[in-house]
Amino acid sequence: MGKGWSAIGIMTTVLAIAACSNSEIPPTAQTPTTQAPAESSPAAEMSPGEKANAEFQDKLSGPELLQALQAGGHIIYFRHAQTDKDYADQADKNMRLEDCETQRKLSAVGIQQAKDIGAAFQAKNIPVGEVVASQYCRAWQHADLAFGRHQKDARLNFLPFEEYSEAQVQEMKDKVMPLLTAVPASGQNTVIVGHDDIFEAATGIYPDPQGIAYVLTPNGQGGFTLQANLLPAEWGSL
């Protein structure tokens, strides 16, 4: 949960637009600048990350996207499916990664979303290699429900704050970029199940709603192309 960040909120519109429209995402950080939004229109009330998500244009869609996924070579980054609440549990001093009862949980809707995603991958013959998830229960449970397996990676975890400094945003980006730029095994796709703040730190895009996925294609040189985003229900109609 990060759309209200003070740090992300001041990231330059250039970063947000670059994450949407450039064909390559460089591994180096952008320098944030302060830009006060206008108050005259609903769009202006969005953070840069929300605006980038809303304005994102697929490069691949429909049969073309399905064929690309069936060929492998992509990273599919899921923001975990819907939870019963949406709050920054990472900032709760009583939250413990080893105890799911102290964390936000997948709702009945979220559980079904994850199952339906997995069924769509099987029905559409989309190959899945590595399945990587954060250590938060809602992420690795989404991975298990959809794909039957997971490996946990702490680089996908939140930092334990509700609001982040620019340095902390950069820290999250530095941690997750190696996962987003790693070329999958031949003929396979890598699935990542993580969180909103982590993806926004790396791309400038705030992934919304819960359960949304972004398809990225690593270029083998430390960058990637953002190809498409899909809502949970859209996998079955590819």
Image (cartoon, rainbow, N blue to C red):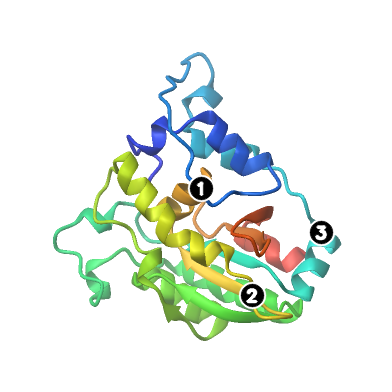
Disc 1 secondary structure class:
loop
Q: Does 148 appear above or below 163?
A: below
Amino acid bearing label 2:
Pro
C-alpha separation, residue under disc 1 versus residue under disc 3: 32 Å
Q: Does 176 appear above or below 3?
A: below
Identify the residue position indicated by label 3 in the image. Answer: 62
Q: Nearer the viewer, mark 1 or mark 3?
A: 1
Amino acid bearing label 3:
Gly
Identify the mark nearer the N-term, 1 or 3.
1
Identify the residue position indicated by label 1 in the image. Answer: 28
In this rendering, position of residue 67 left or right of residue 3: right
| 2 and 1 marks in contact (CB < 8 Å) | no
C-alpha separation, residue under disc 2 versus residue under disc 1: 21 Å
Amino acid bearing label 1:
Thr
Identify the residue position indicated by label 2 in the image. Answer: 184
- Disc 3 crowd rating (10 Å Cα; few below 14, some 14-19, many 20+) is few
